[in-house]
């Protein structure tokens, strides 16, 4: 999927409404505090962070798509969201961020990453002691969600139990998860049901 090319048309009504539900679930699960510094990994155009920025001290948004970051920075300026900073960054490269985050959240990004163990370990390093990681992603499916993307090389969702095992092996405590959202995706006229889960771990 070429996210740069799709960045200008990404914010569809369906995605915006889904982001509202996801953000509410994150806020409920984590119990946000105004003193929190947060990092959104795989932020896209910032649909989640724009639902949360007034509930947090500051948010750093990172993504590997230049187009998505440009679209997000335009929205930041337009809305005068002064506590959101967005820039191009690959979490797995050698230039690491400062480990000062109370909360890291990621939505619908992890399944695009082949080596999730390394990525999750790098996110763990960026959390403060007692900081929380919140993951929203697809429940495991048969590949239907990405059926129209022949170049897709990521994961067809995740088995929640296996993901919690990985979080525990990395060092996260109190790993927990549950499915909270179900919807239908139209694929060439055929409707495919999918669901999202939220998983959390504490450093």
Image (cartoon, rainbow, N blue to C red):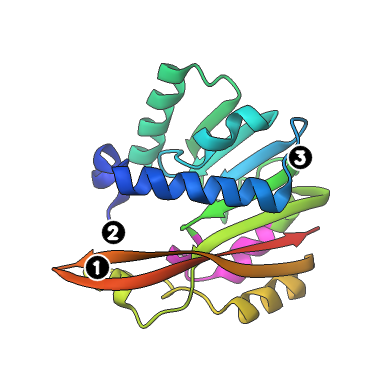
Residue 116 appears in the rendering: yes
Q: Which mark is residue 1?
A: 2
Foreground label between 3 and 1: 1
Q: Nearer the viewer, residue 188 or 172?
A: 188
Q: Is residue 157 above or below residue 124?
A: below
Image x and y of residue 17, in percent: 40, 45
Q: Secondary structure at mark 2?
A: loop
Q: Secondary structure at mark 3?
A: loop
Q: Which residues are drawn in magenta?
A: 110-123
Residue 41 appears in the rendering: no
Which residue is found at the position 34% from the left and 72% from the top?
193
Q: Determine the CA span between mark 3 and mark 1.
A: 36 Å
| Residue 13 quadrant | top left
Which residue is found at the position 64% from the left and 80% from the top?
161
Which residue is found at the position 32% from the left and 40% from the top?
11
The reply to whether the C-beta atoms of the residues labelled 2 and 1 are less than 8 Å apart is yes
Image x and y of residue 2, in percent: 27, 53
Q: Determine the CA span between mark 2 and mark 1.
A: 7 Å
Mark 2 neighbour class, 10 Å CA radius: few under 14, some 14 to 19, many 20 or more: few
Image x and y of residue 153, in percent: 36, 72
Q: Which mark is residue 100?
A: 3
Q: Is residue 79 above or below residue 176?
A: above
Q: Earlier in the sequence, mark 3 or mark 1?
A: 3
Residue 117 is a magenta residue: yes
In this figure, which residue is indicated by the disc labeled 1?
149
Q: Determine the CA span between mark 3 and mark 2.
A: 32 Å
Q: Nearer the viewer, residue 63 or 198?
A: 198
């Amino acid at each position: 999927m070429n996210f740069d090319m799709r960045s200008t048309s990404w914010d569809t009504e369906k995605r915006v409404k889904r982001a509202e539900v996801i953000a509410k679930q994150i806020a409920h699960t984590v119990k946000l505090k105004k003193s929190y510094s947060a990092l959104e990994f795989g932020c896209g155009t910032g649909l989640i962070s724009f639902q949360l920025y007034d509930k947090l001290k500051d948010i750093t948004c990172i993504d590997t798509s230049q187009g998505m970051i440009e679209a997000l920075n335009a929205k930041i300026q337009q809305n005068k969201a002064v506590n959101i900073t967005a820039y191009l960054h690959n979490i797995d490269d050698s230039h690491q961020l400062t480990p000062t985050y109370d909360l890291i959240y990621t939505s619908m990004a992890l399944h695009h990453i082949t080596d999730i163990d390394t990525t999750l370990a790098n996110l763990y390093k960026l959390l403060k002691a007692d900081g929380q990681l919140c993951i929203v992603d697809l429940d495991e499916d048969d590949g239907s969600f990405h059926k129209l993307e022949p170049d897709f090389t990521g994961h067809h969702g995740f088995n929640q139990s296996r993901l919690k095992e990985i979080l525990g092996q990395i060092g996260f405590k109190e790993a927990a998860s549950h499915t909270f959202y179900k919807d239908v995706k139209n694929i060439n006229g055929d409707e495919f049901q999918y669901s999202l889960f939220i998983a959390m771990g504490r450093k």
